[in-house]
Amino acid sequence: MINKSNKKPLTGSWILIHVIFPMLPFLIEGIIRFIILDFSINLHTFSSTTLAASLGLLCLFINQNLLAHNIPLPDENEYEQNGIYGTATLFLAFALTSFILFTIIVLLIAIGEKYNIPPNALSIFEGIVFVFCFFPVFAAVKTQRSYKLRAVI
């Protein structure tokens, strides 16, 4: 029988499953628009709504991976367990923020289409999403390395 606790975590496979996979809708949409728009990148190449939804999924994946993480000796590592719960809560907050931003942007797009409102507020929230996206992705990689998380399929 193979002892799973002795297996080394594979950072590449973890990042593939927990970071790249949830970001695929955003990446695929961007690539399709890049090709259709004659290989030009502008503000409409990548969608902030898809990015916000993808970030929410990414954060939920990591939250669940943290909550399922087993510490070899839980009695002696209470500090590490509390750190895991704190980090899982941080990713849950990131997920909620992502889904709230997604909802706001979709609402602003719908209101703008119905009432022909200038997209000033929409641009602000889209900018927030594009800046915000770096925090969960950076935190995800740092979390994997800090807790030596493994990809669970």
Image (cartoon, rainbow, N blue to C red):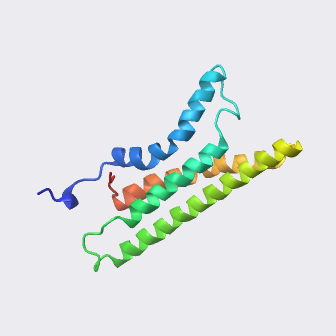
Pinpoint residue 127: horizontal percent, then vertical percent: 71, 46
Q: Position of residue 103 (x, y in %)?
A: 69, 54
Number of marks in the image? Answer: 0
Residue 119 seen by the camera:
no
Q: Residue at x 46, y 43 (%)?
A: 20
Vertical position of residue 111 compared to residue 63: above or below: above
Q: Measuring 82% from the left and 48% from the top, which residue is drawn there? A: 111
Q: Nearer the viewer, residue 112 or 8?
A: 112
Position of 118 with respect to 14 (left or right) is: right
Q: Nearer the viewer, residue 130 or 111?
A: 111
Q: Position of residue 120 (x, y in %)?
A: 83, 46
* Picture quadrant where residue 7 is located: bottom left
Point 51% across, 68% down: residue: 89
Q: Position of residue 66 (x, y in %)?
A: 40, 63
Residue 149 lies left or right of residue 87; in this view the side is left
- Can see residue 153? yes
Q: Residue at x 50, y 52 (%)?
A: 58
Which residue of the protein is positioned furthest toward the front in this rendering?
114
Is residue 73 positioned above or below 23 on the image?
below
As displayed, is residue 33 above or below residue 143?
above
Residue 145, image quadrant: bottom left
Which quarter of the image is occupied by the N terminus? bottom left
